[in-house]
Image (cartoon, grey):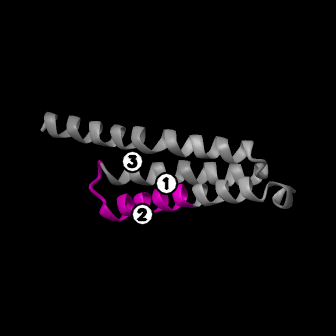
Amino acid sequence: MGNEELQLAIRTHSNAVEYIPITLMLLLTLELNGAPKILIHILGTTLLIERILHAMGLPAKDLHKRVLGMQITICLLIGLAILNIAFLAFAESLKF
């Protein structure tokens, strides 16, 4: 039983280590590209919420929370990539 709990903790931590750094780098790049601060805060809060959902779903073996966390993660990463391209390409017209 102890080994299973340890493996679960390792999986939970490694999943966070895989996704949080790239998301934070995309958030930083978006800020440096001149995005509004409120957008950065909303997206950062979304990151926090989805990581909590995923972390709660993995140890509890709650597939719904885990899948929801994964879906939000992928959507957030894709959205951040698109927003970075948009703010970089149209920097002057998108500034508020």
- Does the CB distance between marks 1 and 3 fall below 8 Å? no
Please determine whether, in this image, residue 25 is positioned above or below residue 71.
above
* Residue 69 screen position, x and y as percent: 43, 58
Percent x, y for residue 30? 68, 48
Name the mark on residue 34.
Answer: none
- Read off the residue under disc 2: 68
Identify the element where label 2 is drawn. helix
Secondary structure type for disc 1 = helix
Q: What kind of residue is marked 2?
A: Leu
Name the amino acid type tagged 3: Ala
> Mark 1 and mark 2 in contact (Cβ < 8 Å)?
yes
Q: Total label count? A: 3
Q: Work out how far the residue at label 1 is from the one at label 3, CA to CA, in angstroms.
A: 8 Å
How far apart are labels 2 and 3 at the CA level? 11 Å
Task: Give how far apart the Cα atoms at labels 2 and 1 are.
Answer: 8 Å
The magenta segment: 59-78
| Snapshot quadrant of residue 65 | bottom left
In terms of sequence position, does the residue under pointer 2 or pointer 1 come before the other? 1
Q: Main secondary structure of the magenta part?
A: helix
Question: Which residue position holds label 3?
Answer: 55
Residue plotted at (39% across, 48% down): 55
> How many other residues sit within 10 Å of disc 2, few (<14), some (14-19) or many (≥20)?
some
The residue drawn where x is 73% and y is 57% is: 89
The residue at the point 28 percent across, 41 percent down is 11
Amino acid at pointer 1 = Glu
State yes or no: discs 2 and 3 in contact (Cβ < 8 Å).
no
Which of marks 3 and 2 precedes in the sequence? 3
| Residue 82 image position (x, y, % from top left) | 61, 60
On residue 50, the disc is 1
